[in-house]
Each structure stands twice: as C-alpha cells, then as structure tokens.
Image (tube, rainbow, N blue to C red):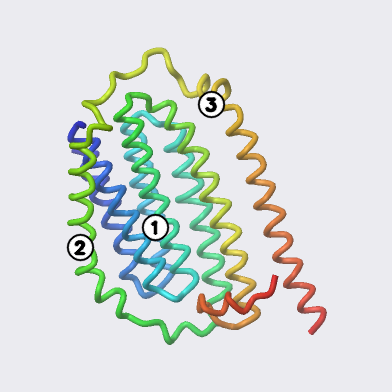
C-alpha cells in the first residue's frame, strides 16, 4: 500500500514541476519527488541507494538549484510562455497511452521471461567493492571532471569581467 | 513480470516522458535542467524495476549509486553554465547558448 502511495505521489510531484510558474516551487516539488523515490528504494531494500537519493538528490541538488534560481532571478524571464503547461494534460494522456503500449509489449516479449529468483548470499559491500570496482574509478573521475569543469567555467567568467 | 515490476516500469517511463516534455517545451534553461532531473528519476525507477525483476537488488543498487553521482555532477556543471550564461546575456533563454564561443 505504501509502495503504491509513494509511487503515485512521486509521479504527481514530478508532473507538478511543469505546472508551477515559480521556479522555487518547482525545485521544492522536485525535491519532494526525490523523497518519494527514496521511500520506494527503501521498500525494496536498496538502503544505500535510498540514502544517496535522499541526501544528494533531495538535498544537494535542491540547494544548488535554489541558489542558482536566487542568483539569476534578476534576469529576463517575463516572456516565458504558459502554453506548455496548458497542453500538458493532453500530452499526459498521450504519454500514458504510449506507456501502457510499451509496457504491454515488454511484458509479452519473449526477451522477458517470468522473472528470476532472488540471488542468495549477495550484499552491497561485496558487489560494490568487489565486483564493481571499476565503477568507483569512474565515479572519482566524474567528480574531478565536475570540480575542474566548474572551476574553468567560473574562471572564464571572472576573466571576462576583468576584460570588460 | 509481477504487478509491482509493471507498476515501477509504468511510472519510470511516464517520468521519463514528462522529463522529455519539460526539456523540449520550455526555453528557460532552469526548466530544461528540471526536465533532465525528472528524466533521471524515471531512469532510476526503471533501473530498480530491472533489479527487482532479476531478483538482484544489490547489483542494481551499485548501478543506481553510480547513476546518482553522474546526475549530480551533470546538474552542478549545467547549473554553473546557466549562471555564466545569465551573467553574460542577462537572460535564461536557451537559444542564447548557441552564441557562446568555445
């Protein structure tokens, strides 16, 4: 029951992101969607992923987003059209139809069988540090790419200011 | 496929489509980034559905953690680009990005 409720709330909060005119409300709605996603992850026993989702996606990304919104609120946003929000209910019906069609096709596909039994004796530590060690190298590289990327972008802005 | 796996797949695909709509329907850069984030939520749900279906949530958990890191780095870098573009053009219109020189 809790699974269904959290999934419905997740979809509702994600759709509300399109309807809010104020970007701060949209960012908060996205954070609530992340909270619901972490509840879903907890229910399936993916505890580490749920904690990551809750702290990073619902916390860090929301903070970054709200900071950027407040730093850029003096810009010209007045000419944004409301048409996409008005069209969204029709588009959602279309998406739902397409969604049902895709999942029905996938459920009946010969590629997908009747499911697999749970693999015994697996735990996250063994999988993450033992079998997926290369992922950690990729993650560290990505974090470095992010840090150096942001530094380069900000340096370009400060050099431009000095030049002006 | 169990009822729960189908429900996870349905929600994940719906979120992905809503994210794609947000990306293509709006010109505001911040809304485009919100669209990417909504898409990422959908992808996480589909990954979870695959793990539940295969009966190995531990494997998929490691992949989800990696994906969350990718998503965060992407959001941070694109928000920095948005900030710089707004400082240069005083607008958040995505069409201005085509004027940026590398």
Around disc 1, counting alpha carbons within 10 Å, would you say few (fewer than 14), some (14 to 19), or many (20 or more)? many
Which chain is indicated by disc 3? A
- Kindly identify the residue that appears in the image at 70 percent across and 65 percent down: A153
x, y percent for residue A142:
63, 45
Disc 3 and disc 1: Cα gap in Å? Answer: 28 Å
Give the answer, above or below, for where A135 lies relative to A85: above
Out of A32 and A135, give the one closest to the viewer. A135
Which chain is indicated by disc 2? A
Numbered circles on residues, count: 3
On the rendered structure, is B60 left or right of B80?
A: left
Q: Which residue lies furthest to the front in this view?
A: A110
x, y percent for residue A126:
52, 19
Which chain is indicated by disc 1? A
Q: In which quarter of the image is residue A94?
A: bottom left
Of mark 3 and mark 1, the one earlier in the sequence is 1
Task: Check disc 3 and report the residue beneath it.
Answer: A128
Out of B89 and A56, give the one closest to the viewer. B89
Mark 1, secondary structure of its residue: helix
Disc 3 and disc 2: Cα gap in Å? Answer: 39 Å
Give the answer, above or below, for where A74 lies relative to B55: below
Around disc 2, counting alpha carbons within 10 Å, would you say few (fewer than 14), some (14 to 19), or many (20 or more)? few
């Amino acid at each position: 029951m809790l699974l269904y409720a959290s999934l419905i709330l997740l979809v509702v909060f994600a759709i509300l992101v399109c309807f809010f005119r104020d970007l701060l409300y949209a960012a908060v709605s996205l954070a609530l969607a992340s909270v619901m996603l972490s509840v879903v992850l907890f229910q399936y026993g993916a505890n580490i992923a749920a904690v990551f989702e809750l702290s990073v996606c619902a916390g860090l990304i929301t903070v970054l987003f709200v900071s950027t919104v407040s730093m850029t609120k003096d810009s010209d946003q007045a000419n944004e059209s409301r048409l996409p929000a008005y069209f969204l209910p029709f588009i959602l019906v279309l998406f739902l139809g397409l969604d049902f069609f895709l999942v029905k096709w996938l459920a009946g596909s010969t590629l997908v069988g009747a499911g697999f039994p749970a693999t015994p004796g697996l735990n996250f530590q063994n999988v993450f540090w033992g079998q997926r060690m290369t992922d950690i190298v990729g993650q560290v590289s990505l974090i470095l790419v992010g840090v150096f990327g942001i530094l380069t972008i900000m340096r370009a802005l400060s050099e431009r200011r000095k030049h002006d | 496929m169990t009822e729960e796996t189908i429900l996870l797949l349905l929600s994940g695909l719906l979120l992905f489509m809503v994210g794609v709509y947000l990306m293509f329907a709006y010109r505001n850069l911040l809304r485009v980034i919100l669209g990417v984030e909504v898409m990422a939520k959908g992808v996480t749900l589909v990954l979870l559905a695959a793990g539940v279906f295969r009966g190995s949530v531990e494997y998929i958990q490691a992949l989800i953690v990696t994906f969350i890191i990718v998503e965060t780095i992407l959001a941070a870098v694109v928000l920095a680009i948005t900030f710089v573009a707004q400082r240069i053009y005083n607008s958040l219109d995505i069409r201005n990005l085509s004027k940026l020189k590398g």
